[in-house]
Amino acid sequence: MERQEEVRANILNIIRDRSESGRLISAEEILTELKRRGLLTSEEIKPKTHLETALKQALQENRDVKEILAPNGVCYYYSVRRLSETYAGILVLKSENPLWLIAEVVRENSKRYPRPVPVAGFMESPFDLTLEAILECLRVMGEDKEYQDIAQTITSVGKTFLYSSRHLDPDYASMLAEWLDVGQADNP
Amino acid sequence: MTGGLIIAFSASGAKAAKEGPVIIMDQAEGLVIADPTKCVGCRRCELACTEFNDGKASPTIARIKISRNLNFGVNGIPTGQRGGGAWGNGLVIQDICNQCPHPVPCANACPNDAIVVRPPTNARVVDSKRCSGCKMCRRACPWEMMSFDSGTNKATKCFLCDGSPKCVEACPSGALTYAAWRDLTGKIPPRVAPTAIVAPEKAQTCNECHKK
Amino acid sequence: MAKHGGWAGKVLRVDLSTGKISTEDTLEKYRDYLGGTGIGYKVIWDEVQAGVKSFDPANKIVYGVGPLAGTGAPCNGRTAITTLWPTCWPKALVASGHMGGQFAAELKYAGYDAIIIEGRADRPVWLSVWDEKVEIKDARQLWGQGIRRTTIEINQQMGPEASVAAIGQAGENLAPMSVVMNSYSHSAGGVGGVMGSKNLKAIGVRGTGSVRIAGNKEEWEKLIKLHLSLLGANNQHVVPSNPQPWAEHYNAGSRWMASAGRRWGAANPSIDTGACEPHNLNRIAYRTNNAAYFLGDKAWQHTVRGNGCTACPIRCHTMLKVPAVSAKYGIPELGQNTCVGLLFGRAFFKSFPDGPKGQTAIEACMVGMYLADDLGVWDNYGQLQRDFQALYYNGIFKRKVAEKEFNSYSWNKYEQGDPTFLFELLPRIANKEGELATALGLGTGHLLERWGIPEQEWLENHDLLYWKLGHPKHHSNEDAGQCGVIINTQYNRDAQCHSHSNFTRNGLPIEVQKRLAAELWGSPDAVDAVAAFTPMNAHKAKMAKWSLLRKELHDCLSLCNWMGPWVASPLKEREYRGDDSIESLLYSLATGDKKSRQELDTIAERIFLLHRALTIRDMGAKDMRTKHDTIPDWVFTDPKDKAAFSKGTIRMDKEDIKLAMDMFYEEMAWDKETGSPTKATYRRLGLGTVADELAKRGLLP
Ligand code: SF4
Ligand code: SF4
Ligand code: SF4
């Protein structure tokens, strides 16, 4: 019993520590870390099931701990005290295909705030894509049915922004891009 | 501690008067250290020091000193780009109290033995009950870290906020750190040449202890 | 020591004509007006007759600060300078300029809440205020010198801690487009020439006293920490500019620029601004980098550190080190300023060889700051540069200026975006050399009049952003639709109000903004998403009133309206709420005079109303709606001719704006038809005698 408590406490630690460093952690990685700490070692009958139960409980009891399912089917864990849901969303998308990442981020921004997103932003942390990779993505998107809503607009100083036509119409998007890129700084 | 005669004293320090002058021997435990490259010259440390400790905003009595170096650096008013501060190379040097090791210049200069050691930090602090406001301590500190509060007519100096420095907590750029004490007195160039004299009674104590 | 905390307790009055120096009891005389612009309007109302012109000896200048100046309340560094505004066209009306820096705090430590300057000295003088020792000193040696030289020489006399507010050649020569400047880069526009007209070169202030906090010091400490926890980056942008682990939201337009990998590159060694998680109060100073925000990513490598006002952790002035400029232009490699100050030099040019955010643009900024902040030239919130571009590219300069003079400028350099052009232009504006430069130094309204250009052309031009009375818009419909429009009708210079724009630009998603708006102004419909405006409603009028009153309150308490109010925060656990009462909490604890949020807003309303009364009196008109609260035509147009209220336009609708003004006047309890406050409203706010005076002149509705 005590051992279970200890395992749960360690799981929480591991998740929160990982979030602190701005990353997600999978069940597999948690297990490895627990083992490194001398927990759930071989004498446990089924460490995996044990871990699953413990994780479930940790999720139930601690509102800051969240689970996120990546498109590849792997579940990742994190603490919203240190890592936001938005960021976690970006991280799982990032682990997948960059097309999907760009499209989803663009759609989310177009819908929620609403605002277009500068292409150059994808070169920065946490996206860290190269310009070539981004341009290649945009080229492929142009040809793929699934991404037909992802559109571009260029500001008066030549910066390209992306938006989703599902949520913004072209004039609105170009106005907002201009506002973000030029308007706000020219009207300080 | 060495020698029976010499007493490192706590703030209450009543018996020192009877047994001879207060000579501080204990090392301080802590020290505020400052990184000028991170200082953004906001003076929040000065204000935290005086508002949260004295209930008034008063850079003049702040026990960390920014204002005097803010514009032109430690050396006053330069012309051109050679100086420090916002008008020079941009660096703001934060002046802090070294919590000097023995012999403690400010304490030794005090004719009233009003600068004493206070646990838990062993900071050198002014016992305001004893301070007569004569300002001898100000003449003694080579780094000009003694302040004088004309409102209370007492000297005041950094007392490390008894271990949780307000200035460190207040700094918006993390330029200040509360660290274990180390001797900075030989490292930080003095701002002035001290002009205080040590009272004969104290001088005698020094001589007695340091007799060959 | 005053009975109350906060205030220093005395107002200093200096008559430069007679040399008489006296003091008044702040609370006895100005208690109902708090400080800052409140004292300013009161003095002008009581003591400066209608019809006085800006540069007349009978005009006065009031340098006012409030009970929070000099304390540890965040963002309290601004001095409000009230006078009859020289660039206000066709007639000077009351307005105020605001400078940050160390002046406000130093004035309080010296023992004063305000300085009133009156009369005119018979020769150049400067004023030395050293605690209770106040002297008028000979400034003949300083006359003709730039602001930097002047400051240094006064500091030599008063010591390095003194704060010096000085004018440059522009002010001396009575160019209306001139500033007073303290602490290297903190200026107040429009005031330089008024000081020059009084032969007042500078005010040096050195204070060794203190500001007492009346309340319990532990409570004060707690309150300060609460306030700090609610701060965002500059302009109260509460989300970072790119995704960060701790942040739920981000916005490419945010001034919260800190991020892992973005470094103060010219610090030695360089410093990573890193994650600035909002709960970490020891990293607030890294959030903002206005050089990087305005000049682009290249500015990071030149950033030495942030700088700014006393007690402000935001540091909106960025210190830049650009070694190349010393060899290239013979100017110091260090420069610093914020927003329009940073952009001063760059904004004259249409383009640069290496693009708008390249190295040349940065160099133009360095040259601009070096010159303008020494000569003391003002740019009227960028109107100077917008006018310049229009006047040049539309061939107006060529038509209005003699050929020889026109050809004496290197226009080829100008067109190529060569920053050395600024060495030709800016000194001439300051020294009023030639027709072109002299006209530019007058400000837009007077320039148009002098050159016989109908103001209408400016009112119609969407790109010039000109509003009225010689001044541009400042956070108008582009930021907050009708609310912004209303705000821009109210002042006699650019509105300088940020209460509304700090909210609409805070970076939070529109549904969060709407949730907060419902709590603050009664309905989510008070705010719209940018460029997706909806028709007017009463809640927008409420927001406009609130915005104006908070601006005025900040200008009186000495809180920075470029940061406040703090009604949104970066804190997720507060659901991004700020605290609408932070001003009254600070005021009550600092002064010991307990006032609720509503009570303080009422005082702010009184002060704002006095500003209105002064405007009415000095215009000699009560029909403010048509004569003063005007709206330029461009507001009702769209470059793509999109209809008002369609998505993607900031175009407003004429009928709707009429309704907006109706609703605003109603909210203020002013007469709807004229836009003039009613007698009952003056009475309710304790301005009965003001109403009587206006009644005598037939200026009540
Ligand atoms: S006040 Fe000066 S002499 Fe005294 S301990 Fe501090 S640094 Fe040393
Ligand atoms: S440690 Fe305390 S007493 Fe010393 S300078 Fe800092 S705030 Fe002031
Ligand atoms: S609080 Fe920090 S940044 Fe501000 S003046 Fe003090 S040391 Fe410098």
Image (cartoon, coloured by chain):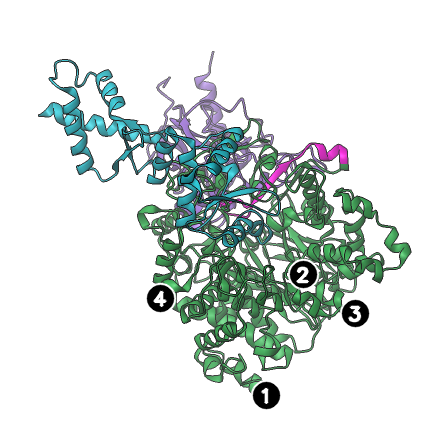
Chain colours: A cyan, B purple, C green
Percent position of residue B91, x then y: 59, 34
C245 versus A185 height, above or below = above
Percent position of residue B36, x then y: 54, 32
Label 2 element class: loop
Q: Amino acid at mark 4?
A: Gly
Q: Residues within 10 Å of mark 3 (few under 14, many from 20)?
A: few
Q: Which mark is residue C452?
A: 3
- Between disc 1 and disc 3, whose residue precedes? 3
Mark pair 4, 3: CA separation: 48 Å
Q: Which residues are magenta?
A: C308-328
Q: Which residue is mark 1?
A: C698
Q: Is mark 3 within 8 Å of ligand 3?
A: no
Q: Amino acid at mark 1?
A: Gly
Q: Which residue is mark 2?
A: C190
Label 3 element class: loop
Say whether mark 3 and mark 4 are on the same chain. yes
Mark pair 1, 2: CA separation: 31 Å
Instruction: Decide whether residue B212 is among the magenta residues.
Output: no
- Between disc 3 and disc 2, whose residue precedes? 2
